[in-house]
């Protein structure tokens, strides 16, 4: 859901960071994952543990885990606040930020305790086995 230009007062108009967002119950787990992400990437990361009622905090797949008592978080670039093509037919592959995606993906894959991810010199990930 694209909210509009007024959100530019709070959020950037480009994906200059990745965000880890959780509810309060999941805060400790999110903090551990954020530390692991930062140990594996220099990509800017912002974190927030907050109320589920804050617009955008529970707008993704992690909400179903919360509703069943599991700890979970959302990894996001806040596109739903700044990107007019978000979840629209015009949201096509040519609009993705591939360089940023290439920098973030290996660090996210390393968050798994079973990860066998190796990063190449250009930041691309190679997965031996998950």
Image (cartoon, rainbow, N blue to C red):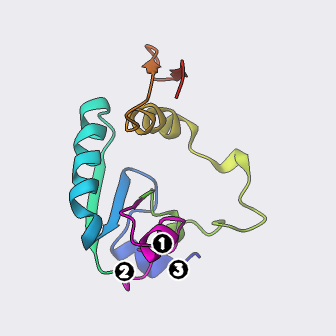
Q: Earlier in the sequence, mark 3 or mark 2?
A: 3
Q: Main secondary structure of the magenta part?
A: loop
Question: With 40 as the anchor, is 104 left or right in this view?
Answer: right
The quarter of the picture where the N terminus appears is: bottom right
Which residue is the site of mark 2?
52
Q: Which residues are magenta?
A: 52-73
Q: Give the spatial CA distance, label 3 vs label 2.
A: 18 Å
Q: Earlier in the sequence, mark 1 or mark 3?
A: 3
Q: Give the spatial CA distance, label 2 vs label 1.
A: 9 Å
Label 3 or label 2, whichever lies nearer to me, is 2
Where residue 61 appears, x then y in whole percent? 54, 65
The residue at the point 36 percent across, 50 percent down is: 17
Front residue of 119/62: it is 62
Residues under numbered marks 2 and 1 in contact, where contact means CB atoms less than 8 Å apart? yes
Which residue is the site of mark 1?
63
Would residue 78 be counted in the magenta stretch? no
Q: Earlier in the sequence, mark 2 or mark 1?
A: 2
- How packed mark 2 is, by other alpha carbons closer than 10 Å (few <14, some 14-19, many 20 or more), is some
Question: Circle 3 sits in a helix, a strand or a loop, which is it?
Answer: loop
Front residue of 24/16: it is 24
Q: Give the spatial CA distance, label 1 vs label 3.
A: 20 Å
Question: Circle 1 sits in a helix, a strand or a loop, which is it?
Answer: helix
């Amino acid at each position: 859901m694209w909210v509009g230009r007024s959100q530019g007062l709070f959020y950037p108009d480009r994906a200059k960071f990745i965000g880890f967002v959780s509810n309060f119950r999941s805060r400790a787990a999110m903090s551990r994952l954020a530390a692991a992400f930062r140990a594996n990437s220099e990509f800017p990361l912002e974190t927030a543990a907050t109320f589920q009622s804050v617009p955008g905090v529970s707008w993704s797949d992690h909400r179903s885990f919360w509703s069943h008592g599991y700890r979970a978080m959302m990894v996001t670039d806040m596109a739903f606040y700044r990107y007019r093509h978000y979840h629209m037919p015009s949201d096509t592959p040519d609009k993705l930020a591939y360089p940023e995606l290439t920098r973030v993906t290996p660090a996210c894959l390393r968050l798994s305790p079973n990860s066998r991810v190796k990063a190449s010199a250009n930041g691309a990930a190679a997965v031996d086995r998950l």
